[in-house]
Amino acid sequence: MLAPNSWLRDYAPGYRHLERPERRAVSDFVMLWSVYEAQVLDCNASAQKMLDAIERWHNHHLLASDKSDESWTHFVERLRSEDGIGHRFAGLKITNVGHKDLVRSAVLAEPPGPDQLTRHSAMAIIIHRIRNNLLHGEKWSYGLRDQADNFRHASHMLMLWMDMDRTAID
């Protein structure tokens, strides 16, 4: 039987250049996404279903926590440039105009930034696009370079949201 890591090192563009922690970040994200989609999105992911969950948690006053601040800061710094929206924003490939406008305005908001509902909504769209870009092959066009922190922060948010979902259900 073939060993997946050996095969990926030989045939997946850029995989051999990823450090073990980078590969682990991707793997962790995929596993957490699977649990999140099953538990929170009823095995049927969409950006809208993610936004509906965020709204539900907001209505239960669960978004007031500052546990998301570090991840929010990461995504803002990654997507913003000195002149406004940076080149990585286009790489998300957000096709829904309303979603694109929400993320753009949230990322460009002046300090202290948008409210928690807007932040979490923007991160849901960003993370949904990270997921789609990974699972539909887009991220292989650059060999997954410079993605480890994206996956770590996305994983952090998925765990935080699953905790919120359990609290909202209880």
Image: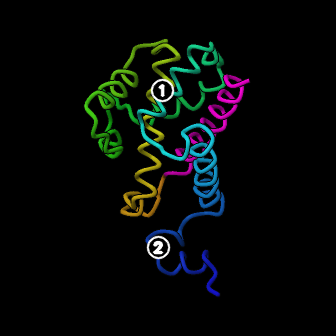
At which x and y percent is residue 94? 31, 40
Q: Residue at x 48, y 33 (%)?
A: 50
Q: Image quadrant for the N terminus? A: bottom right
Asked whether 24 or 42 is in front, the reply is: 42
At which x and y percent is residue 41? 54, 39
Q: Secondary structure at mark 1?
A: helix
Work out whether mark 2 precedes mark 1 in sequence or the reverse, and give the earlier one: 2
Kindly identify the amino acid type of the residue bearing the numbered disc 2: Ala
Q: Nearer the viewer, mark 2 or mark 1?
A: 1
At which x and y percent is residue 105? 34, 21
At which x and y percent is residue 6? 60, 80
Q: Secondary structure at mark 2?
A: loop
Q: What is the span of residues highlighted in magenta in the rendered image?
A: 147-170
Kindly identify the amino acid type of the residue bearing the numbered disc 1: Asp
Instruction: For label 1, count other residues whose C-alpha is less than 10 Å away and answer few (under 14), some (14-19) or many (20+).
Output: some
The numbered mark at residue 12 is 2
Q: Is residue 120 left or right of residue 25?
A: left
- For label 1, the residue is 52
Q: Is residue 99 left or right of residue 165?
A: left
- Quadrant housing residue 161: top right
